[in-house]
Image (spheres, grey):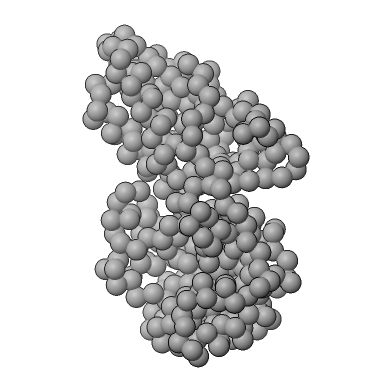
Amino acid sequence: MYITREPVDLGKFFLRLPDASCGAAASFVGLVRNHDQGRRVQKLYYECYESMADKMIGILVSEAHEKWNVKDIHVSHRIGPLEIGEAAVAIAVSSSHRDEAFRACRYLIEEIKKRVPIWKKEIFEDGTAEWVTCSHPVEMAS
Amino acid sequence: MIRGLVLAGGRSLRFGSDKALALYEGTSFLDRAVSLLASLELKPIVVTRQGANYPLAGCAVIYDKLFEKGPLGGLYTAMSVFKNTAFLVVPCDMPALTPLVLSDLLAAHEPHFGITVYSTESGIQPFPGLYEPSLFEVVRNKLRQEDLSVHDVLDSVPAKKVMNWKGDREIFCNVNYRKDLTRR
């Protein structure tokens, strides 16, 4: 399962040691930021049809395996209410060499944003709320 | 009183088999739609064509009074059976809808609006939508004129609330062909 309603434990998520054949591990964390297009965000909700979103992430993971010679891919996408600073999505890719790991990691987050049917609702500090498109870059942590 | 209404009267000609019963990861589209409305405590009703036999528990099933009149015919049937009832209407073939998207419609709706719906860049989305019983005459007249367009009903109702949807439009996509599922 790639979709979770529980907080993503980043410590545990990234503590998994890659296979000994791997010389690279690339990772990405998408975080809830406190602003969007000049407005102060208080929190947000992610919602989806879980089995549909889960299946789509599985397809993307398979695609990444086909495109690059990577060893392990881990993805966790949280849904439900999220507070500022919490991790919405975490991705870890290991491979023999860094180029494949970076490329696969980048591919996964971009395609998740574009193709996985997860809907985002932002709650602003002024009390208003809006459903917004997920199809734009989020902050990168690593 | 507001109840959930699932439109499941289509013949699924483009899909090739009964779309309502098509399984997605072990759940039929129909069950998905019914459980969405049940999660909002809207006591779901399914309106379907005469002769359809769906294995449903815990919800009312009613049959189209008019033959092949599309979503408007389904809404007319529900309005004529359950009088003085407003409906949150969901087609059975919009599996990407979620409870919060529907509960936002409910929260925004006020009875003096005949209709509450979302609007995207491509225009008003008739479904999901909240339809008040005061629309019954409008719906009946459109059907009498053989005008089956839900958009025409929307156009003829001045008191409607249209919520601007800035999120991904894919949430309103209908599954019409099997290939629509394979890209999921």
Residue at 48%, 72% (x, y): give it. Answer: B7
Quarter of the view holding residue B107: bottom right
Q: Is residue A109 left or right of residue B160?
A: left
Q: Is residue B109 above or below residue B154?
A: above
Q: Is residue A102 above or below residue B100?
A: above
Residue at 41%, 22% (x, y): give it. Answer: A92
Residue A133: give x, y in percent of width and height: 52, 42
Quarter of the view holding residue A94: top left
Q: Is residue B99 above or below residue B31?
A: above
Residue B140: give x, y in percent of width and height: 56, 87
Residue closest to the far right: A126
Residue at 57%, 73% (x, y): give it. Answer: B155
Residue at 27%, 12% (x, y): give it. Answer: A96
Q: Nearer the viewer, residue B57 or A126?
A: A126
Give the tally of numbered discs: 0
Q: Is residue A54 visible?
A: no
Residue B95: give x, y in percent of width and height: 45, 57
Quarter of the view holding residue B141: bottom right
Q: Is residue B126 above or below residue A119?
A: below
Residue B31: give x, y in percent of width and height: 46, 63
Assign the N terminus of chain B to one quadrant of the image.
Answer: bottom right
Q: Nearer the viewer, residue A68 or B41?
A: A68
Q: Nearer the viewer, residue A49 or B53?
A: A49
Q: Is residue A70 visible?
A: yes
